[in-house]
Image (cartoon, rainbow, N blue to C red):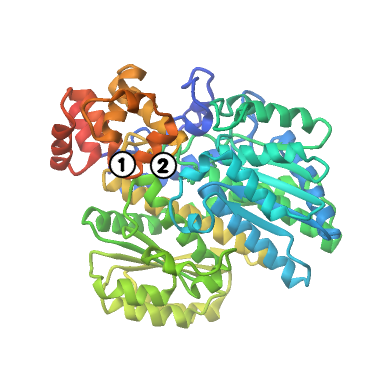
Amino acid sequence: MHAGREWTCSPAAMHAWESPDYEPSLPVSEKSNPLTRDIDRASASHIVRILQATDAQMFQEDTGATYKRLVSKQVVETLMEVAEKVELILKDPRDSLVVLSGCGTSGRLAFLITSDFNKALRELNQSPVYRYIIAGGDRALLSSQEAPEDDPELGALSLKKVCEGKKHVLFIGISCGLSAPFVAGQLDFCMQHLEVFTPVLVGFNPSHQARDDPMSGCTFTFRSLVQRMEELSKSKKAFLINPAVGPEAVSGSSRMKGGSATKILLEVVFSAAHAAAFTNSPITFKGIQEHVDAYRQSLDITYSHTEGITPLLEAAGQSLRHGKRVCYLGWGSVGILGLIDASECNPTFGADFEDVRGFISGGYGQLNNNEGPLSSLGPDFCISHEDFLRQVLPSLDDWDTVLLIYTHSDSVSEVAKLALRVRGKTSNIHAVYHQVDGDTAAAVQQSDVNKLCSSSLKITWPSSAPESFLRMQWELSTKLLLNAVSTGAHILKGKIYQNHMIDVQVTNSKLYCRALRLLQKLSGCTESKCEEALLRAIYNSDTLTAEITSSDVGSHTQTARNRTEVVPLALVCLLTGCSLQEAESHLRRHVIVREAVAAHMS
Ligand code: S6P
């Protein structure tokens, strides 16, 4: 443990990942972050500080060296151009749409952003022009659906369906790693129909680092597609928004910075377009640059509360270590961030859906998703507070952590009522509450909630910001905070080795490649030996048949869906030369995967 030792981050360490010699074969989104190498042995407060430094890399200045950054001239100019396209659609929305699409977290953020901006349009009596697509459909908003990410045809078909009969479509494909075949299929479809579609790609790798693997049914790769888009961008028929934000805190976990930067960039674009269309404020370079920069403040304000965030990580970590639950009870759009964060724990940490769960006041009525209520799909799709009271509350005790997430525009008396019911079962109840400067009325009501909670984190925002921007800041702040809580809690549970998630699910081709790389890095064995061990673990067989070895990655990932701990199993086999059965019993003895690996590495 590093507990007690002060963690500081030198400017050189902040930039170390940018060196051309640093993990040169990996794109930025998959590199391991030098800042987080020891995060697996850090205390809760250290983890928060390390995450703060890692998130701050999003706003690093453009040094003119290797990478474009959020506020680089070229990035800001492209944001302006895309905002102008959106403005045109807002001014004449007939037969037009702005479609946002992505897989996993990128699709979830597409949903959140389209909801926010359609709501803004409805408030102005304008027709909602934004649509979202998420690979795997609405169930992917709340659960892990990794396989559709590999299907370019499905992507193109779903885009075609949403845009039926439209004459102008601005399509924004989000793939943080410039890697998702689902999004590639959509961008390719757009480029075949440029008379209707203007494609925009949002991601966080330079174009030469886009994925170059073959994709099912395609003659092109993501990288060649990006090259075609770059060509088209010269005549403004396509746009690429791809600054680098530095490697993720947990390698490849693009739900963190990738998701945050997606939210920042697209909100900046749409806010500028709305201001231009409805309040005659021109889209300017300075305006865009300042707006991006204003989000840096959201980060600073959030992390100025390290002391308040730390107990949340500690409580959540304790709960997970004891096989108990963490529940987010949210209100309004910050509640949606709770649902999103909880849904990511399964694919990111191999967590059970019961481990971290999100609930929102108003349930699906508040979510207002394309496919409507999904509760009939099973208990993991029950998301209202009533569902929580019925399904979860009766079994809670002091080992479970409950986190209330709300803002001053929510009904604090309703929060207090729910808090009281929770308090009857567990004293391990915490609150995170956003308010604006000088809001004394809410402060009085808030004290009722405080009395029921073992910790209350009040985050105060300057009242000078416009209401719509305040809400976006609260959302980003909640995202950072919950990402820190769930990541930190799983680190404290021992799920991370150095800064790698060892127990990665191997449920699509990106994750399959990541698993193979991880096995090579940790075992030092050749790629072919690692793949052999991985397949043995996936197919649960010490000998590999010709049928297995001749199958494609799609079949491997499909089979892996029904298996658990395949990467830890493969790693133990590689390190010890033991059989699968022996590896299984070894892992059973070391419940903490990090310790099992560390024991063999030393
Ligand atoms: C990552 C998250 C994944 C990704 C998804 C899409 O932390 O668990 O669900 O969002 O794989 O990735 P990308 O690079 O296409 O945005």
Q: In the picture provided, is 30 more to the left or to the right than 190?
A: left
First of labels 2, 1 by sequence position: 1
The quadrant holding residue 123 is bottom right
Classed neighbour count for the residue bearing mark 2: other residues with Cα under 10 Å, few (<14), some (14–19), many (≥20) = many
Classed neighbour count for the residue bearing mark 1: other residues with Cα under 10 Å, few (<14), some (14–19), many (≥20) = many
Residue 500, percent across and down?
36, 35
Task: Evaluate whether residue 465 shows in this view.
Answer: no
What kind of element bears circle 1?
A: loop
Mark 2 vs 1: CB contact within 8 A = yes
Q: What mark, if any, has residue 50 been given in the picture?
A: 2
Cα separation, mark 2 vs mark 1, equals: 9 Å
Residue that badge 1 annotates: 42
Q: Identity of the amino acid at label 2?
A: Ile
Viewer-proximal residue among 547 and 523: 547
Quadrant of the rendering where the N terminus is positioned: top left
Q: In the picture provided, is 27 more to the left or to the right than 167?
A: left
Compared with 44, 91 (above or below) is below
